[in-house]
Image: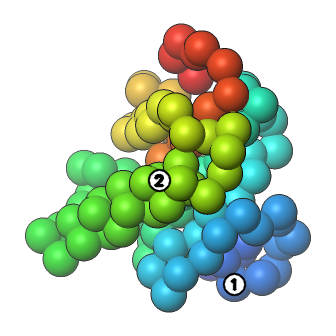
Amino acid sequence: MQECVFCKIIRGDIASKKIAETDDILVIEDIAPKAPVHYLIIPKKHIQDIQAMENVDFFYGSKMLAMAQQLSKTIPAAHDFKLQVNSGKMAGQIVMHLHVHFTAGKLSGAL
């Protein structure tokens, strides 16, 4: 999707602080962190939200969980972490591109 901010970041049109990357997933630092460690785990394929996922897209869900595990093993402050997915505007999703909030470094409630 041409106008999606995450798609622009994935294409390199908008700068971001990359934390990790695979062929399918990009991890960036959140620009408005809610915890000492606050990353966004984003599939490189544009998928609006969980409701828009097709059967072939569930592959990205497992890739995002695997990335969360990898982050927890490689970033000392992120050994214990929280994952949150907001799916749809009424649930607080601001960027309409599926992503997982990875937070760590303090006890936290809802994002």
Residue 48 shows in this picture: no
Residue indicated by mark 1: 11
Label 1: how many Cα within 10 Å (few below 14, some 14–19, many 20+): few
Q: Nearer the viewer, residue 102 or 9?
A: 102
Relative to 21, does residue 98 appear above or below in the rendering? above
How many angstroms separate mark 1 from mark 2 (CA)? Answer: 22 Å
Q: Amino acid at mark 2?
A: Ala
Q: Is 94 located above or below residue 50 in the figure?
A: above
Q: Residues within 10 Å of mark 2 (few under 14, many from 20)?
A: many
**Residue 28 shows which numbered tag?**
none
- Residue at the spot 18% in from the left edge and 77% down from the top edge: 56
What's the residue at 53%, 49% (across, down)?
72
The picture places residue 74, in percent across and down from the top left corner, at 61, 58
Q: Which residue is at the front of the view, 37 or 59?
A: 37
- 46 lies left or right of 27: left
Q: Quadrant of the C terminus?
A: top right
Quadrant in which the N terminus appears: bottom right
Reply above or below: 107 against 68: above
Q: Which residue is mark 2?
A: 68
Q: Would residue 22 be visible to someone looking at this image? A: yes
SS assignment at label 1: helix
Residue drawn at the location 50% of the way across and 87% of the way down: 23
